[in-house]
Amino acid sequence: MTALSADAASMANLLVVLTQPDTEAIRQAELALKPILKDPRCVPALVEILKARDSQPPPVRHVGGIILRKRLPGHYSKFDVSTKAALKAEILNVLASEPERTVRNGMVGVASSLGKLECGAGGTSWPELFQFIAAAGAEQQPEARELAFWLLQEMTDTIGQHLKSQFQPICGLFANALVPNEDPKVQKAAVKAVGQLLSYLADEPEVEVFAGLIPPILDVAARNVSDDELISTVLDVLYDLAYSPSHAVTAHLVPMVQFSLQCIRSAELEMGVRDSAALVIATLAEAKPKTFGKEEALLAQVLETLFALIENSPDSAAGALFESNPTWRQDLDDDGDGEEYDPEMDSPTETSMAQGTLDMLACEIPKKYIFEPAVSRCVQRLNSPQANHRKAGIAGLGVIAEGCAEPLREHLNELMPFVLQCAQDGDAQVRECACFCLGQIAEHCQPEILAYSEQILPIVFNLLDDKTVAVQATSCYVLEMFCERLEPEAVRPLLDSLVKKLAAMLESTNKRSVQEMTVAALAATAVAAEEEFTPYVGGVASLMTKCMALTEERLYSLRGRALECMGHMAIAVGRETFRPYFQVTMECACEGLTRDSTDLHEFAYAVFANLAKVMKEEFAPALPDLVPHLVQVIGTDEGQIEPAEEAEKAGEFGAFDDSDNEDEEGGNFVWHVRTALLEVKKGAITAVGELAAHTGAAFCPHLESVMQVLQKAASNWHPLIKCEVADALPSMVVPSVAAHHNGEIQWVKGDVSSANPMSQHTSAVVSAVLTELIAMLKDDDKTTVAKACEGIQSVIELCGPHALLPVANECLTSTHELLTKTSPCQINDEYLGEVPEDDDDHDLVTQAACDLVGGFCRVMGAQFAQYLPQFLPAVCEYAKSSRPPRDRSMAIGWLSEVAQELEDSIFDYWKPVFLPATLAGLGDPSDDVKRNAAFSAGVCCEKLRERVIGDYPQILQGLEPLFGIDPSSGESAAACVDNAAAAVARMIMASPGNVPMAQVFPAFLKLLPLKTDMTENETVYTCLLGLLQVQHPDALSQKSELQRIFTEATAPGSKVDEEIQAKLRQAMPALQ
């Protein structure tokens, strides 16, 4: 037995104490060790202890290894070359000869730490270590091979950063271990090591060296599908690889998804692991939507699995409505088995996992791939006699409503009968899911869903009496989503009974889910009814005042909903009617800010925003106290650096971390993101924007402090905050315009030679706002960029060409990049291998950019003509027949805007661009495209007049089929007919002698009065009145038809403006 040196023996005695279950003794030993460990001589002493297998027990050697790893980085540079070489040799000897698994594992950490020091500090890079790993990997004993992969796993960062030249031999080592006949523990060690390296290299080109190992990794994992730890490791790797730009990785998308599906289906795995597998599938769909979508068989497998999970799970399938709200979940649980709901035990369910994944697929995968297979599976189940199948079908339809809203709107007439039938199903879960589905469709399929109001409202009204809590709550949710967009006349027949029913429900139920959704439904009903809600304001306000007085923390959400309802009522009935309730609502909102509740703060900011819209300058007295508070909230970091927990901070024996300062935390801090504060900050930004927009000049003293905090927030890391800033920034201009321009700047289109109409103050605010918004056009988040486009458009249309002039070049360049899909937020798709295709789904960024160019035209007028050679080809790309209907509609609509604003400056482009695009649009299969093409035809004829009369025959020929469209078949069809009528009116007014009136005029009159596009009333009736005024013979020959049109247009309930109606009444005697 080799005797230890005095230093080593002394340390060994202290290490023995650290292994004993005596807290006070451990504390004393730690205090004694700390000064010893500051001396470099502790390193050779610890190595002595590690070698002393005959005298030191494994626990002492294990602790010695942990402490050596912690102290080595601080002392290693103090050793000379020979000492370092000896130390490295000793460590390899211990690794090679140590029989105890725990001690050997600890020594892996020591070797890894030393390898990092050698490679990272310009050392020798310790070739002997890699020779050792290679030799161990080829040993006969499985323990030696396992050790090799432990070392490789521990050294992931070092290998990834400094040893790229060794990648091929390392890859060969992994490949040899990932074969079916290898020892299972070696396989698992290899999988963990290579997986960690793949995760590290996911964004690097070198990941391709190891990408070929993905299939054997999945094979090993599939053979161990009941091993939760291994499966979790592999799923983490797949998640990290999802966004890899490497084609070599993407080539394995199918087996990656199939393995994840295997995990989702496996009841042996913990629910959290299965949910991780679902996240991998959702993330792959998000990162590689086209690649995923093109794999039809794979997509079918995924959808079948998800629908089967919803079918076979007994859990509520009302989507995220209940999953996201613990108190509502408690209502469901109380309504069921009587067991009290425990939020601490909350975990994913098969249903929530399946629905969350389906939602992501619907939102991310192009509609041309996802809609048909998803909706066909819904319909197949909706026709089933089995209730659980119908539940899955109707729940699935609700889940895909957001992502597939556009194609869903086109198929509502086929799908709504199923939805309405399910809402009256004999099975409570089917009814509940039907309500959820109705709410989702009402939210995402506007305005088409409004055509079903007469069928939906009575059914939902009856469901309010359902005996099932979930059905009651979800039926209130339907009312909330549906009523928000209804016109007063649609809700009028049920208004009285609906308000009374909801009020009675609120007073009689003790279920918080029903209470909260009842309040939300009342708020939405008020918004729909508008001034017709006035008789109910007092009674509803009385109920809300009781709820707003709640002080129990568990009822804060209900209190917040009541506050929200007051804000919505204010918007519905207006300032005069709401004034008596303004003060009490403000007091409740402000009192909520004193409570430690992010929920109450969010609701308070929302009500401030709504009340400012309604009360306008009457809100101004609240600004001096409220704005500084909002500024403080917006300026608060939603993340914070906090000391790590002891267990996380340094693992075992954190007190011995390498540090010369006893008071330091050793650099162990964690960045915690407080997501609740993100929502609060978003709400505060919304509120400050609305306050600026509606309180007038009174907001001016606060502009400087608000702008400073918004400028900082504009570079926030989270898209939620950046979007809200982009939304709020344009409002900062409004107070200055109110204070210095009496609310309106008088500017002339295209005129930059005259004096700047903006005051110095307004110019400064505009400059600051546009600078931030233009910078946001370079953001990598599409929603932020779209909001920035909208903001720029808002500012320049408010302030005119002098606002645009200083930033025009930068603004035009960035907008052109967006239209040609070369901006930072768009090239990321190509980076991930998702190359743009003509039939890609309509993009909100492209739409916003197109609208912004329309704004340039409105502000610059004929000055914009010089940029048409660049912008016409960019936008007309979207008019191609291979593009989706919304793209084509957008492009043709933009051409009409350009014609409207640039007038005869477009003539050079009439024959090569405007005419062929318009004629193609008139023949398009989409009513929306035809509508815009009809408008474009009319506007071009109006602006170019005699210069295009030679093309009238072609245009009229293109318009003729639109006259035969049935306007009752849908709003788009009706708008299409209206715009065709308006186009003819413009052509007649521009050049009546070139319109074959005898044939066209009678057909034109049959389209009147207009059905839906009331903005064209002025055009149509100006045309008719003008013809009568000049006593045009074709008009005089149609007096009876004109009398019919004028009578209908002036009848009670007509949507024709009063001013136009007055002119029509004045003309009617001449038609007798």
Image: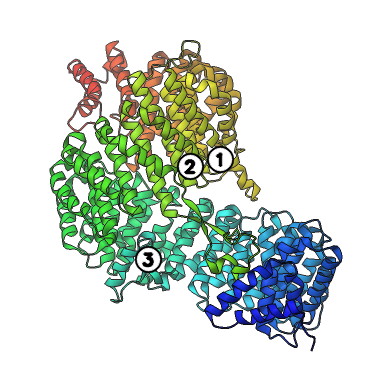
Is residue 55 placed above or below 376 in the rendered structure? below
Residue sticking out furthest to the right:
82
Question: CB atoms at circles 2 and 3 under 8 Å apart?
Answer: no
Residue identifier under label 3: 317
Query: Which image quarter is the N terminus in?
Result: bottom right
Q: Position of residue 195 (x, y in %)?
A: 67, 66
Number of numbered discs on residues: 3
Q: Is disc 3 placed on a helix, strand or loop?
A: loop
Front residue of 976/177: it is 177
The tag on residue 779 is: 1
Q: How many other residues sit within 10 Å of disc 3, few (<14), some (14-19) or many (≥20)?
A: many
Residue at figure coordinates x 71%, y 63% from the top left? 73
Mark earlier in primary sequence (2, 3): 3
Q: Position of residue 1044 (x, y in %)?
A: 22, 26
Q: Is disc 1 placed on a helix, strand or loop?
A: loop
Q: Position of residue 576 (x, y in %)?
A: 17, 34
The tag on residue 725 is: none
The picture quadrant where one finds residue 69 is: bottom right
The tag on residue 722 is: 2
Report how far apart the C-alphas of labels 1 and 2 lie in the structure. 9 Å
